[in-house]
């Protein structure tokens, strides 16, 4: 597929109607789709979405798992997307943020996924350069806090670090969070702000059970009577960007 032709092919569809949604966001290649799989009742359904290169997921993917009382939204990654040219990349990123703003009331929990093997260099860039580049993870946390969407930092690929290195990276992360006045609310059942930080690996399954427990504790508080019925939503196609613009 030529890079130019891919530009015209992206259609960013938003989910329609009001239904509780769990979202995964973060840089490209950090393991969002891999984690999404493990959160579903049948992980095999979603196997093909995991990619070896950055930018595997170029569309917002709505997963309607009948075993869950919410949709799971696997978002494309920020950063380099090998299947798209630079301007399309930027457009996808704007659309991701726009989606979150539009669907803010339905998103009961946002998982901000970070790859532990890349976090240190991301933070170091900020520490040692001019501190002008806000680390993406920090920016995303701030974005969610401003929109009142509870978020959880998921430090994925923990299998790639030894415990010594892990301690160093976590220390740096805490320093950065402090520096930006971001409070970690260590009560993961809280529905406000950054509710916690969790380490996971989709390779060893470390932390996956704990992650599911946190999600379940939030999902169990959802009052479905306040939302559209799943059946009604099934009849509706997703809305695409053009339609939204027309509606305004
Ligand atoms: N070592 C290790 N590799 C992982 C882990 N989770 C995911 N990966 C690998 O990381 C690569 C990217 O995984 P994806 O799940 O496609 O990442 P993504 O965040 O959805 O990527 P985009 O869709 O491109 O934004 C794949 O090769 C995965 O096998 C993990 O916990 N540990
Ligand atoms: Mg993906």
Image (tube, rainbow, N blue to C red):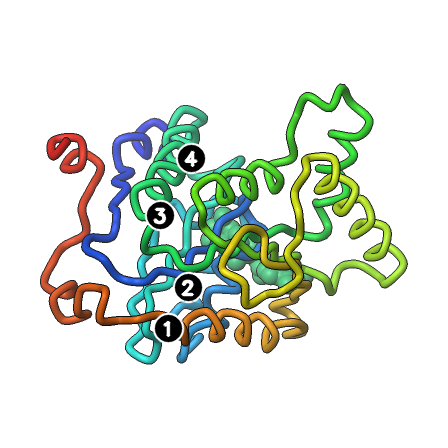
Which circle, 4 or 3, is nearer the viewer?
Answer: 3
**Residue contact at pointers 2 and 1, CB within 8 angstroms:** no
According to the picture, the residue beneath numbered tag 4 turns out to be 93
Spatial separation of the CA atoms under disc 4 and disc 2: 22 Å
According to the picture, the residue beneath numbered tag 2 turns out to be 48
- Taking the spot 78% from the left edge, 34% from the top edge, the residue there is 124
Split into 4 quadrants, where in the image is the N terminus? top left
Q: Is residue 52 visible?
A: no
Spatial separation of the CA atoms under disc 3 and disc 2: 28 Å
Split into 4 quadrants, where in the image is the C terminus? top left
Q: Mark 3: which secondary structure?
A: loop
First along the sequence among labels 4 and 2: 2
Q: Quadrant of residue 2?
A: top left
Residue 151, horizontal then vertical, whole percent:
53, 54
* Vertical order, 18 against 181 (above or below): below
Q: Is mark 4 within 8 Å of ligand 1?
A: no
First along the sequence among labels 4 and 1: 1
Spatial separation of the CA atoms under disc 4 and disc 1: 26 Å
Q: Residues within 10 Å of mark 2 (few under 14, many from 20)?
A: few
Which circle, 3 or 2, is nearer the viewer?
Answer: 3
Residue 84, horizontal then vertical, whole percent:
41, 34
Q: Quadrant of residue 213?
A: bottom right
Residue 122, horizontal then vertical, whole percent:
71, 37
Q: Is residue 73 left or right of residue 204?
A: left
Q: Mark 1: which secondary structure?
A: helix
Question: Residue 23, labelled with which disc?
Answer: none
Q: Is residue 203 left or right of residue 246?
A: right
């Amino acid at each position: 597929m030529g890079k130019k032709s891919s530009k015209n092919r992206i259609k960013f569809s938003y989910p329609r109607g009001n239904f509780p949604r769990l979202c995964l966001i973060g840089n490209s290649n950090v393991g969002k789709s891999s984690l999404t799989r493990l959160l579903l009742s049948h992980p095999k359904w979603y196997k093909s979405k995991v990619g070896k290169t950055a930018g595997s997921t170029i569309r917002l993917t709505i997963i309607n798992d009948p075993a869950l009382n919410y949709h799971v939204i696997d978002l494309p990654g920020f950063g380099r997307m090998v299947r798209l040219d630079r301007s399309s990349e930027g457009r996808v990123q704007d659309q991701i943020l726009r989606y979150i703003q539009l669907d803010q009331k339905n998103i009961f929990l946002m998982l901000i996924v970070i790859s532990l093997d890349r976090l240190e260099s991301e933070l170091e860039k900020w520490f040692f350069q001019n501190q002008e580049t806000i680390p993406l993870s920090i920016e995303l946390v701030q974005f969610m806090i401003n929109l009142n969407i509870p978020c959880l930092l998921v430090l994925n690929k923990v299998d790639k670090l030894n415990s010594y290195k892990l301690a160093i990276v976590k220390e740096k992360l805490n320093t950065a969070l402090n520096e930006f006045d971001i409070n970690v609310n260590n009560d993961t059942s809280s529905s406000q702000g950054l509710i916690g930080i969790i380490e996971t690996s989709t390779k060893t399954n470390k932390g996956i059970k704990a992650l599911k427990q946190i999600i379940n504790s939030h999902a169990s508080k959802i009052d479905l009577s306040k939302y559209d019925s799943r059946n009604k939503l099934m009849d509706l196609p997703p809305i695409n960007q053009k339609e939204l613009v027309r509606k305004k």
